Image (spheres, rainbow, N blue to C red):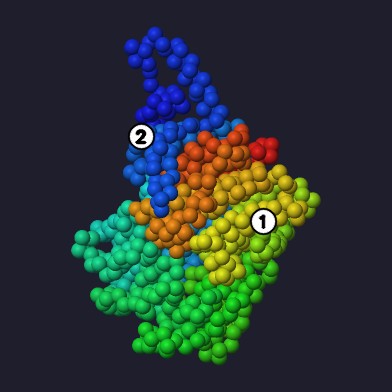
Amino acid sequence: MKNLAIATPVLCLLLGCGQPSSNEESKSMQTETVKADSQSEAMLSGPVAKKVPYKLEQHGDTRIDEYYWMRDDARTDPEILAHLQAEEDYAQQQLAHTKALQDTLFEELTGRLQKDESSVPVKIRDFYYQTRYLPGKEYQQYLRADKADMANSELLLDVNELAKDKEYYALGDFSISNNDNLLAYSDDSLSRRVYTIRFKDLASGENLADELTGTNGQVIWANDNTTVFYLKKDLQTLLAYQVYRHTLGTPQSDDVLVYEEKDNTYYTQLGKSLDDQYIEIYHDATLNKGMSLIDANKPQSPAEFVYPIEANHEYWVQPHGDDFYILSNHEAENFRVLKANKKDVKDKSKWQEVVAHNPDVFIADILVLKNHLILKQRKNGVLQLKVFDLTSKASNVIGFDDPVYLAGFTQNVEFDTKTLRVYYASMTTPKTIFDVDLTTDNKTLLKQDKILGDFDAANYQSERIMVTARDGAKIPVSLVYRKDKFKKDGTNPVLQYAYGSYGSTIDPSFNSTMLSVVDRGFVYAIAHIRGSQMLGRPWYEDGKLLNKKNTFNDFVDVSKALVEQKYAATDKVFAAGGSAGGLLMGAVVNQAPELYLGIAALVPFVDVVTTMSDPSIPLTTNEYDEWGNPADKAYYDYMLSYSPYDNVEKKAYPNILVSTGLHDSQVQYFEPAKWVAKLRDYKTDDNALLFHVNMEAGHGGASGRYQRYKDWAMIFAFYLDLLGENK
């Protein structure tokens, strides 16, 4: 798709395609002169998309979308593909003078990576499992051994071989049968997040004939070693909605439908309980969450709800023998932990409280082991891991040194254990893996990521500040900078990042990528704006639906405060956000374009009203409780008041770099394509507007370990070039 031979007359002015026909030969010199002038103008101002008025009507309101024609669900329309390619060509032409800088940045970014990096081995039954990168390779190898030192390890999968000759490749699930003899794995070679499940006999090394197509990638083994459960996707909406049971050696057409989610506002996921008792089906809408279970020892048995799904109730369970520990927000906005016997669990009146609700502490997750209950909780925005001994009822909080950080439990695959595996990082501390002895609280360091080059944590400083928003809310902001490059005098550039949707919290963690700008004097700031759960569930509720504008206002107010407090120069403020964070970027440049020198809007969700009005677009229906359903006029009017695409105005905008992937399954390519076309038509400035289109990738960008850094090198070069820096 990168060498398009077909183009419409409109785009021929940009691409220089075609030759004059014989009856036009007398005009050829004049035509070629006009064409050359048009091409020269296009390379200065960017491709100009044609306008085809399309009427959209709701609630008596009429919108005219002049770029609606850019939508092609099949992604085969030659005119659209040619326009996208023209945008990519223009972006690369405009950035061509930064090529040497991009190469330098790419070498920096990849040069920090340990070339032969391996994961900490994880013991599952009789074997230890590990992933590793070989020097220069894009993908991991998966290995196992019978000893923790991984001596005489067995190669199970080499993803480099699986990805060979493919433009894109992503491994999904990797799951071993209970008898350790069979491997199930899934892969996607298009970047639409639609996976094929495959099976490998680990004794012979050969793949089985079974292949399960059209799935979300998850595959869960029953305890009989011949039955697996998986989820099929609706290939239009890309919602995973049907749970199937497959018996090895039989065709997929014989698979049994176990559960079908008929309410398309729900996401469906699969899991397996830590004690191997149950196959788990998760039912996940924004406001309602619950689970169904299947006896893993009796895979033919039906799926049964643990407790009926009900409005405004979110619960998850983890089994403990004949009991369930329940994380629930029933009468507990910030959640609490309860317990019930499996015979009583459908009667909420018999749920017994284990950890009471605390309005100042948000319980984000729980882990139930045989002798311990561990909470991942957030107090004043700071994560804590709190451990309860289920016998003595004593509790303690696992301590860490940094004032703000990221921490959680990971790779805990054994139920009967007194050891908790923990991950930890801060903005100055690379990712670290500990084992914590739950009886003594002693930590054993297993691994800390090595950052190659001249990295020294002592050279960097992190801070947590609180910014007062326009309505009085106090917004946490996490900062990191290089001590010898920073002066609190209002001269440093700042790169501000946020997400701010779905309750997703961006914790202050180590990001080696950002060293390339921090080492050049940038302050890197993460704004923990409303729409996340940094300050608990109320912080999320205050940044969604009819409160969504708080998210955008918070971001703008943080930008102003960073300048006022001398962390940032007035004319050197940069911002970045992706997906729903790209919506954030679109909203803030409409609200306060004068604040920013450069913006990176990555795979941005910017056409809010049109997308949320069309249930055929992937993921729309599940988002109603996040954004609202525009079939309701109150939500329609509110969305319309902030939707970036609908609110583009004839005014000056900052320098903007936009990205998309043609096969993006989360935010369809035509949203940013339309937004860029409208911005280019409306904006009154001469600032850069570049649209990087990856014609092979999806929502996550390029696949592979190193390729993703090419995009970051381009983004950073875009920023640095605006500052006049070319090295």
- Of the residues shown, which amino acid type is indicated by label 1? Val
User: Label 2: how many residues lie within 10 Å, few (<14), some (14-19) or many (20+)?
Assistant: some
Answer left or right for 211 relative to 439.
left
Between 68 and 514, the residue placed more toward the observer is 68
The structure residue drawn at horizontal position 45% and vertical position 64%, both measured from the top left corner, is 625
Q: Residue at x 55, y 81 (%)?
A: 357
Residue 522 x/y as whole percent: 69, 49
Amino acid beneath label 2? Pro
Could you tell me which residue is drawn at 44 percent across and 15 percent down?
31
Q: Work out whether 313 lies above or below 478.
A: below
At which x and y percent is residue 472?
A: 67, 64
Kindly identify which residue carries mark 2: 78
| Residue closest to the eye, 142 or 210 | 210
Q: Is residue 273 above or below residue 530?
A: below
**Earlier sequence position, callout 1 versus callout 2:** 2
Q: Position of residue 583 (x, y in %)?
A: 52, 51
Can residue 695 be seen in the rendering of this structure?
no
Please give the label number shown on residue 122.
none
Relative vertical location of residue 227 with respect to residue 358 in this rendering, above or below: above
Residue for badge 1: 558
Please tell me how many numbered marks the rendered image carries.
2
Task: Give the structural element (helix, strand or loop) at label 2.
Answer: helix
Relative to 303, say whether 183 is above or below: above
Residue 199, given in percent of the width and then of the height, sits at 31, 61
Between circles 1 and 2, the one closer to the viewer is 1
Q: Nearer the viewer, residue 127 or 375?
A: 375
Question: Which part of the image, by quadrant, shows the N terminus?
Answer: top left
Q: Is residue 537 visible in this depiction of the protein?
A: yes
Residue at the location (66% across, 44% down)? 594
- Mark 1, other Cα within 10 Å: few <14 / some 14–19 / many ≥20: many
